Image: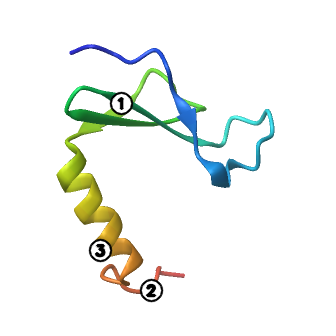
Amino acid sequence: MTIPANWQKSSFSGGGEGNDCVELAATPGTIHLRESDTPATHLSTAPGPLAQLVHHIKSGGLGAPAV
């Protein structure tokens, strides 16, 4: 598997220099996600399943977070 070189930080990361950001990168047919504080570990998925997950989360499909 090719590990991408160009990671992009989430716009919700606050733009600071801290290592508490979600980062994304794309290679042909694959989306990669990682946390900036653990850059050696990343999750890879196809765009379709990731889009379905994001839609499910945005529509409240996971319910309220546990407190």
Residue tagged 1 = 26
Q: Is residue 5 left or right of residue 8?
A: left
Q: Amino acid at mark 3?
A: His
Q: Left of 62 or right of it: where is 13?
A: right
Which residue: 66% across, 42% down?
Answer: 20
- 42 sits to left or right of 47: right
> Residue drawn at (23%, 64%), measured in percent from left and top?
52
Assign a secondary structure to mark 1: strand
Front residue of 67/29: it is 29
Residue matched to label 2: 64
Indicate which label's residue lies in the foreground, 1 or 3. 1
Q: Which mark is residue 41?
A: none
The amino acid pointed to by label 2 is Ala
Q: Is residue 5 above or below residue 18?
A: above
Looking at the image, residue 60 lies above or below residue 28: below
Q: Residues within 10 Å of mark 1 (few under 14, many from 20)?
A: some
What distance separates the C-alpha of mark 2 from that of mark 1? Answer: 30 Å
Which numbered dot is residue 56?
3
